[in-house]
Image (cartoon, rainbow, N blue to C red):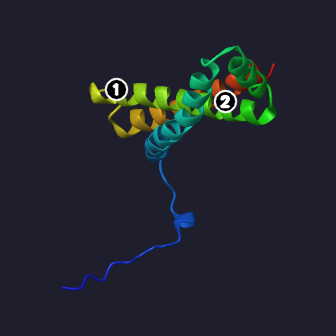
Amino acid sequence: MKKQRPVNLDLSTISFPAPAIASILHRVTGVALFFALVFVIWAWAYSLQDQQSFDYVKALMTSHLAKFIAWGTITVLIYHLVGGIRHLIMDMGHWEELKSGNLSAKVTIALWAVLAVLAGVWLWF
């Protein structure tokens, strides 16, 4: 039986609601954290070898690229934590209605943006 359903392959025409964006971002940041841990674990393990290794990692962390990677890792961690708290509250039965779920998703994304800027200020200044 062949179904004649409309197929829209142009993803730029699809408008996702805020809860969908918040949920997708939570999954994407989880994957990003997994890959960011490679950098974090390497820096931590290498810096613990001896004093010269520690000084090398310390000097490396002063470069703009390393600060950008650190900021990205912190930003991803912040969103994953804030989004995770939102999901935990939803698991307890709150913010499950359309209006409150939409508002909680928007607040989560806005709070993440503010905390990401604050993390950047803290890291670079």
Which residue lies at the image location 74% right of the left edge and 30% below the top edge?
A: 67
Q: Nearer the viewer, residue 71 or 21?
A: 71
- As drawn, the residue found furthest toward the left would be 1
Q: In x, y percent, where is residue 88?
A: 34, 26
Above or below residue 28? Residue 13 is: below
Q: Nearer the viewer, residue 34 or 5?
A: 34
**Eye-nearest disc, 1 or 2:** 2
Q: Are marks 1 and 2 in contact (CB under 8 Å)?
A: no
Label 1 residue SS: helix
Q: In x, y percent, where is residue 16?
A: 49, 53
> Image quadrant for the N terminus?
bottom left
What residue does disc 2 label? 70
Question: Label 1: few (<14), some or many (≥20) within 10 Å?
Answer: few
Q: Nearer the viewer, residue 4 or 119?
A: 119
Total numbered circles: 2
- In the rendered structure, the answer to whether residue 32 lies left or right of residue 94 reads right
Question: Label 2: few (<14), some or many (≥20) within 10 Å?
Answer: some
- Image quarter of residue 52: top right
Label 2 residue SS: helix
Q: In x, y percent, where is residue 92?
A: 27, 24
Which residue lies at the image location 49% right of the left edge and 46% below the top edge?
A: 21
- Image quarter of residue 61: top right
Q: CA distance from mark 1 to mark 2?
A: 27 Å
Q: What kind of residue is marked 2?
A: Ala
Q: What kind of residue is marked 1?
A: Leu
Which residue lies at the image location 69% right of the left edge and 18% below the top edge?
A: 54
Q: Earlier in the sequence, mark 1 or mark 2?
A: 2
Q: Nearer the viewer, residue 54 or 71?
A: 54
Above or below residue 72? Residue 9 is: below
Residue 88: numbered disc: 1
